[in-house]
Image (cartoon, rainbow, N blue to C red):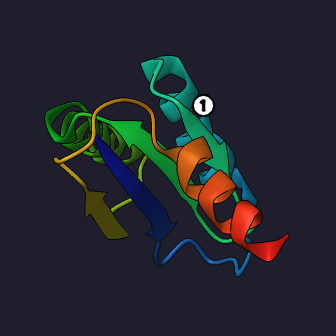
């Protein structure tokens, strides 16, 4: 199970605002059914890598269909294969426990 940080930016839109693109991408992520968290600068998604990569490709295809000609995506992957199951909450809990 992988935890993936995803940031999508469309270039050449004529605006410095990204909220329309972020909302578009977030709708696609939520529609995927994969567990996710929207953060101020990215979205964290949890799931099988193949599902996440398929989602990223779908996001790119749909943004292109909306008229965006240049899409820049940053992906950071934590693919821990020695432990099964959901990990986003467990990772946060591990740090919170150490802060007590």
Left or right: 88, with 54 as reference point: right
Return the x and y of residue 35 as percentages of the image width and height. Answer: 52, 30
Seen at 79% across and 74% down, the residue is 99
Q: Is residue 56 above or below residue 71?
A: above
Return the x and y of residue 13 as percentages of the image width and height. Answer: 56, 71
Q: Is residue 60 above or below residue 6?
A: above
Q: Residues within 10 Å of mark 1 (few under 14, many from 20)?
A: few
Q: Is residue 52 above or below residue 22?
A: above
Asked which quadrant contains residue 19, the reply is bottom right
Q: Is residue 66 visible?
A: no
Under tag 1, what secondary structure? helix
Seen at 73% across and 61% down, the residue is 97
Asked which quadrant contains residue 83, the reply is top left
Left or right: 9, with 82 as reference point: right
Asked which quadrant contains residue 37, the reply is top right
Seen at 51% across and 19% down, the residue is 31
């Amino acid at each position: 199970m992988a935890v993936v940080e995803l940031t999508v930016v469309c270039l050449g839109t004529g605006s410095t605002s990204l909220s329309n693109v972020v909302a578009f991408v977030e709708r696609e992520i939520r529609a995927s059914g994969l567990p996710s968290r929207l953060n101020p600068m990215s979205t964290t998604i949890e799931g099988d890598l193949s599902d996440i990569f398929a989602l990223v490709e779908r996001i790119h295809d749909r943004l292109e269909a909306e008229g965006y000609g240049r899409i820049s995506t940053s992906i950071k992957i934590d693919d821990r294969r020695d432990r099964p199951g959901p990990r986003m909450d467990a990772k946060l809990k591990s740090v919170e426990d150490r802060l007590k």
